[in-house]
Amino acid sequence: MSSETSGGSTCVHLLVLIHGMWGNPVHLAEMKRVVEERRGQPSSEKGPGGEQLRVLVAETNKEDGTYDGIDWGGERVAEEVYGEVKRLEKEGRKVTRFSVTGYSLGGLIARYVVGILHQRGFFADVKPVNFNTVATPHIGLPRYPTFLSSVFAFFGPKLLSRTGEQFYVVDKWSKNGRPLIEVMADPNRLFYQALTLFQHVRIYANAVNDVTVPYLTAAIETEDTFVNHVEDGLEVEFDQEYAPIMKSYTRPTSVVRPPKPRALSAQWFKGFKPNRPLLPPALQFRFPYNLLVFILTPVLIPVLFTLIITRLSLASHASRSRIKKLEKDESGAERLVHIVGRLEREVEDAVVDMFDNAGTSTANRTASEPTLVVPVSSSASTPLSASTSRSGSESPNSDLKLVAAVEGSANVATEEQHSSVLALNATQRKLVAWLNTLPGLKKELVFIHPVRNSHAVIISRDVKRFPSHKQGEGVLRHWADHFII
């Protein structure tokens, strides 16, 4: 589906929107509406060549198709892009500028898509302008030291087919066994290089309450400074025009935690009161129906759990069968996985030759060094904070003034507490370092509280069924208003 354009110019700025896991184009209806109202009207600002906006919401990868992996999803969306370009040509129009925005899994698919387009020479004639992601697990899904997180990390790769393996960075996508997400973040690979071509790269991340895609993977960070925001008394200043986007936040100079209440006291029972809803919106009912739900919870939980496991298992099995058929089909163009695999083998051969001919100095290297396929610059080896500028450009989060006034022992205690909660593996920490070297990368943090899960709210995914999703409209307006036409 696409928006209609009108006017004298035949030049088009094509914007592609990509939904997330289990998603469909309807999930991005508000995003499409906002950008067309603010940037796609006949009277709206035009591009330098008179380009008018055309919005394409990807459709071929919806619902169970999202099980098939980032790569197959990317291949499908790339074909949609070429199909839309051909349709526009039949209308007498020409795509001269290109942008893409991905939500959740859609952001990873977007990164794969631009790699395909770059490899095929699409950007030789088309200017890449805006690359945006919203609540995207850029470094995969982290594993927290909790029971539920361990359960999801165990079952996710098994029940979510190829996509689950890639989410948890346990796949062996390249010919030498590297996970796809790692290859996509490598500065020496075409996926990363394609991102550097874009004039404007900005990511939006939920700072709190995103149960689906936590802060550190959406914001590409190694430390979660918001994990105990309630206990720490965090004070947030919102962007007046684009709330719930954060303008700044302040942490008290000292955090004095009250002593633990005596067991079974009134204060002890109050501690069990959640600061956000326990149930998802679909199960939040008014009295007396809410009471009935709680009474039936011991029965509903095992029934729902069984239904969910069965549904995921069937969908995963169907996905794996579908992937086998796709991989046996040799009729299409050479897939990007084959091209990248060939490049990796060439690099490996070059590295082997380098070590074979390096002389005695190479023999004294540590055993771990030869395992590095591609050398990385020193600037990429240290994770960078959100307030650190990349590649000499402005801070990626320059609009967010971080006023973290934690000092002394309180600071040390907080850092220790946060590090004990987070659990990034070595690969994920490397991805953070690599991705934070993207030139001009900007980050916008969103503070939606209290909600049970802010993942759907950030894009106003279903405002008709859940009015609370309207809280995310400020994020959509910010995205549309900062969109370079």
Image: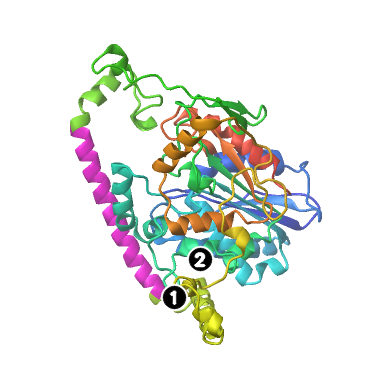
Say the numbered circle drawn on residue 183.
2
Q: Based on the displayed image, in which of its 4 quarters is residue 302 positioned?
A: top left
Task: Give the quadrant of residue 482.
Answer: top right
Badge 1: residue crowd in 10 Å (few <14, some 14–19, many ≥20): some
Which residue range is magenta in the image?
299-327
Q: Residue type at mark 2: give it.
A: Val
Q: Position of residue 136 (x, y in %)?
A: 51, 48
- Residue at the outermost top position: 266
Q: Residue at x 54, y 49 (%)?
A: 220
| Magenta span main SS | helix
Q: Which residue is mark 1?
A: 175
Secondary structure of the residue carrying tag 2 is: helix
The reply, left or right, for residue 332 in relation to residue 82 is left
Question: In the drawing, what numbered circle is on residue 38?
Answer: none
In front of the other: 33 or 92? 33
Q: What is the C-alpha distance between the residues marked 1 and 2?
A: 11 Å
User: Percent position (x, y) of residue 346?
Assistant: 53, 81
Residue 347 drawn above or below residue 403: below
